[in-house]
Image (cartoon, rainbow, N blue to C red):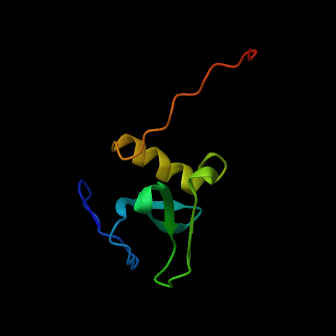
Amino acid sequence: MSYDGFDEWPRFDHECQHCVFLGPHDYCGHTFDLYFCAQWGYPTVLARASDKPADYFSGLPLSHCHPILGEAKTRAQRMGLLSLPKERPMGRRT
């Protein structure tokens, strides 16, 4: 795991050695550790809520509607870890 650029360490245990720590995030009175992972060539973002192995949620496709995963996606993009293809303009296909 990488902690570059942060004054804080993760609050919760996270055992994936491929994940990059994106920093803590407070939301509605709860603190989450945010991560980016590109293991096996499938990038994703995740938010860990405790030390329990199953106490996290993830999914890059959910980042557009889930505010915590959206924050993780934004941080990953700002750090240059994640680049998404530019959207094509709406219009008629030929």
Give residue 56's quadrant in the image.
bottom right
Residue 24, position in %: x, y? 41, 62
Relative height, residue 64 to residue 54 (above, below): above
Give residue 80's quadrant in the image.
top left
Q: Is residue 39 left or right of residue 67?
A: left
Give residue 77's quadrant in the image.
top left
The residue shown at (37%, 41%) is 78
Is residue 78 at least partly visible in the picture?
yes
Which residue is more in the foreground, 62 or 66?
Answer: 62
The residue shown at (34%, 66%) is 18
Residue 62, position in %: x, y? 63, 53
Relative height, residue 73 to residue 29 (above, below): above
The residue shown at (41%, 62%) is 39
Residue 84, position in %: x, y? 49, 38
Which residue is more in the foreground, 82 or 72?
Answer: 82
Relative height, residue 67 to residue 86 (above, below): below
Residue 11, position in %: x, y? 38, 74
Quadrant in which the C terminus is drawn: top right
